[in-house]
Image (cartoon, rainbow, N blue to C red):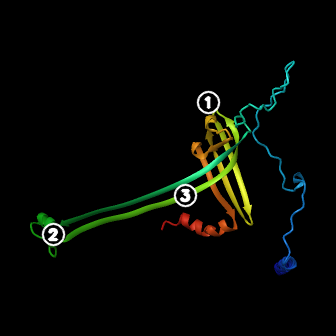
Amino acid sequence: MNIFKLTATAALLSMLGACTAADRLASIGATPALSAIEDPTAQVNYRPVTMPMPETVVASYQPNSLFRTDARGFFKDQRAHRIGDILTVNVTIDDRAQIANQTARGRTSTNNAGVGGAIGSIFGALAPGLSSTDIDVSSGVNDAGTGSVNRSESLETQVAVVVTQILPNGNLVIEGHQEVRVNFEVRDLVVAGIVRPEDISSNNTIESSKIAEARIAYGGRGQITDVQQPRYGQQVLDAILPF
C-alpha cells in the first residue's frame, strides 16, 4: 500500500511538472495576461471589513436653512478627529549608534600551610615524611571582555492609519497596517501610537517623531525571508544548548 501511494504521488507530481513546463513553453514571447475584472465580494477568501466607527449622528434640518447637521462643510476642519477617520503618517527614521566597551579584571591568591609542623605540634616533633610546607595552594582569576555596537537604520515612507480610540484628554489612538507583495515576498509595515490633534497638519498628515508610545514595525515574510532565517532545528539547539 505504501509503495502504491508513493508511486501515485510521484506520478501526480510529474504530471503537474509537465503541465507547468508546457504552460511556460507556450507563453514564450507572449506578454503576461492580465486577470479579468471580477466582483471582489465573490472571491473565495473575501471577508467583510470591520473597523471602529464613530457614533451615528441623526441628520436634522433647521427651518428656513439650507444646511443639515451631517453635511460636509466647506469651512470645517477636515483633519482626523473622530473614531474611524484616516490619518497619513510620514515615517522617517534615521538612527545611528556607536558604542564600545572594554573591561578587564584579575585576581591572584597564594596560600601555604605546613601540615608537618601542625601535626608535630601535637606529637612534639614533625610527623615522619612531612615537611613544614607540604600544602601549597594558589589560585588566579582573569576576566577580559570587549563589546561594540555599530548600528545604522534608515526608513522613509508613508502609511495611512485609522483612529481607533479617543482618550479622555482628546488624544487620538492610531493604528495602521500596510502590506505589499512582490512575487513571493510580502513587505509588512505596522504603525501604532498616540497623537495630539494639534500636531496634525492642515493636509491631515503627521510626522512619526510626534507619535507617543510609537510602535513601528517594518519587515517581511516570504521565500527570501525564509532563506535568511536559521532552520527550526538550529534555533531549537541555540535555545537549549548552554555552550
Asked if residue 1 can be seen in this view, the reply is: no
Camera-side residue of 4 and 81: 81
Of the residues shown, which amino acid type is indicated by label 2? Gly
Name which quarter of the figure residue 20 lies in: bottom right
| Whether residue 21 is situated above or below residue 133 in the rendered picture | below
Q: Is residue 125 left or right of residue 97?
A: left
Callout 2: SS: helix
Q: Which mark is residue 169?
A: 1
x then y, percent, for residue 198: 62, 34
Name which quarter of the figure residue 57 lies in: top right
Give the labeled residue for mark 3. Answer: 153
Q: Looking at the image, which residue is at 16% across and 76% down?
A: 129
Tell me if mark 2 has few (under 14), some (14-19) or many (20+) residues whose alpha carbon lies within 10 angstroms of its own.
some
Callout 1: SS: loop
Q: Which mark is residue 67?
A: none
Q: Is residue 159 left or right of residue 71?
A: left
Camera-side residue of 243 and 106: 106
Q: Earlier in the sequence, mark 3 or mark 1?
A: 3
Q: Earlier in the sequence, mark 3 or mark 2?
A: 2
Q: Looking at the image, which residue is at 21% across and 69% down?
A: 136
Q: Is residue 197 left or right of residue 5?
A: left
Of the residues shown, which amino acid type is indicated by label 3? Glu
Camera-side residue of 86 and 107: 86
Give the labeled residue for mark 2. Answer: 116
Tell me if mark 1 has few (under 14), some (14-19) or many (20+) residues whose alpha carbon lies within 10 angstroms of its own.
few
x then y, percent, for residue 4: 85, 80
Tell me if mark 3 has few (under 14), some (14-19) or many (20+) residues whose alpha carbon lies within 10 angstroms of its own.
few
Q: Looking at the image, which residue is at 59% across and 66% down?
A: 235
x then y, percent, for residue 56: 80, 31
